Amino acid sequence: DRDAVDDKLDVLAALWAAAAWCEEAHSRSMLSEAAAAEDDGSQVAREEAGWKILQLSPFEIHFSQTRIRAEFQDGRPLQEAQDEIKASPLQQDGSDDSGPLLLVTPFPHIEVTRWRCKLRTADGVARVDPDTGLELYSEEERWFSFDNRRLCCLQRAAAQHWPRHVLCEVIEVSASLARTRELRKFDTRTLGFSVQVGRRDVPDLDTWSWRAAVGLEEESLPEIGVTLPGGARWRGARGPRGAGPPSGSRGGKGGARRRRGTDADDDEDENPSGSWPVWQSAMAFLIIYLLLRLSMMLLKKYQSQ
């Protein structure tokens, strides 16, 4: 009968809300495990958490945002952290004075992931395929970082040793784990080749580009891209966008124990993990559940009339 059907719908709605909450809790748990893995310094723990330590040139890594602040969340200027970065020979035996250098930093390793960047116009509007209306992405995957301020420090330090090959240690975040981050804040308009430095309300922001800093010609931005399976359709221009909100980044040792000179967030967002705290997740679950219950009650009332 109708009551039995309504009861089943109520159960399904509750199960759906519970599944959504569990998925968020699982993502938060994965990030917490990865943060703990970096803290204890165990390579095995990092790999079990889905993380790897790689050595990459800072110039291989692209910015994920349009703009960063000139200071970290604790107020420390980027320049101060940059000045503390040391470069030591990768081969410690001193056999090759022209060999690669490894940057030793006062802050935690940056996190990187392989990603196809969404193509955007200069005012931030997503480029779309004229035939399908689907958003366009870069033809190849590139290394991107969520820790844009630390990446800026690393690129500036590496540029001081140009043309010598310079490496830094980074943490590779798997694609599945990267999707739990705030990828909607991935708003670079230059494929991450450059980044604006300064606060949003400051006109004529400085732009950092490592190629310009070492005297190389800037790379041209692609006009042609590819669509991805299940890609989003363009929903219309939302107008010129300001600098995007921050990328979620843990910064130092996670939570209140962050080390100095970490991104934590690349803007005003105060949630360092890129996921909601437990109480917010619980509240979201409760609100969704109550809204679904209210919808069912209104539906029942409408059907009974």
Image: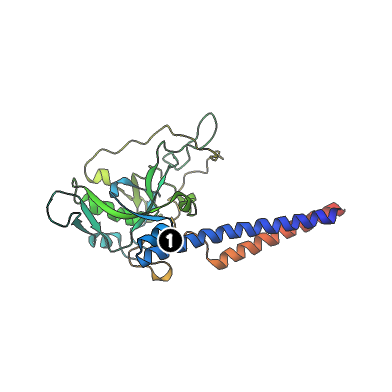
Report the front residue among 200 and 228. 228
* Residue 86 falls left or right of residue 225: left
Tally of numbered discs: 1
In the rendering, at what x and y percent does residue 176 appear?
A: 48, 50
Residue 303 shows in this picture = yes
Residue sitting at x 44%, y 47%: 187
Q: Residue reaching furthest top?
A: 131
Can residue 252 be seen in this snapshot? Answer: no
**Residue situated in front as seen by the camera: 191 or 11:** 11
Looking at the rendered structure, the kind of residue marked 1 is Ala
* Residue 214 vertical placement versus 147 (above, below): above
Where residue 26 sits, quadrant-wise, is bottom right
Figure colour scheme: rainbow
Locate residue 76, reporting x and y percent. 32, 65
Task: Name the residue nearer the viewer: 286 or 219.
Answer: 286
Note whether 193 is above or below 296 in the view shown. above
Q: Nearer the viewer, residue 279 or 35?
A: 35
Query: Where 5 sits versus 280, above or below?
Result: above
Q: Is residue 294 left or right of residue 4?
A: left
Q: Residue furthest front?
A: 44
Q: Is residue 203 left or right of residue 245?
A: left
Crowding at mark 1 (Cα within 10 Å: few <14, some 14-19, many 20+): many
**Relative vertical location of residue 295 with respect to residue 122 in this rendering, above or below:** below
**For residue 20, which quarter of the picture?**
bottom right
Residue at mark 1 = 34
The picture quadrant where one finds residue 193 is top left
* Helix, strand or loop at mark 1: helix
Kindly identify the residue that appears in the image at 43 percent across and 61 percent down: 34
Question: What is the x, y in percent for residue 218?
Answer: 29, 39
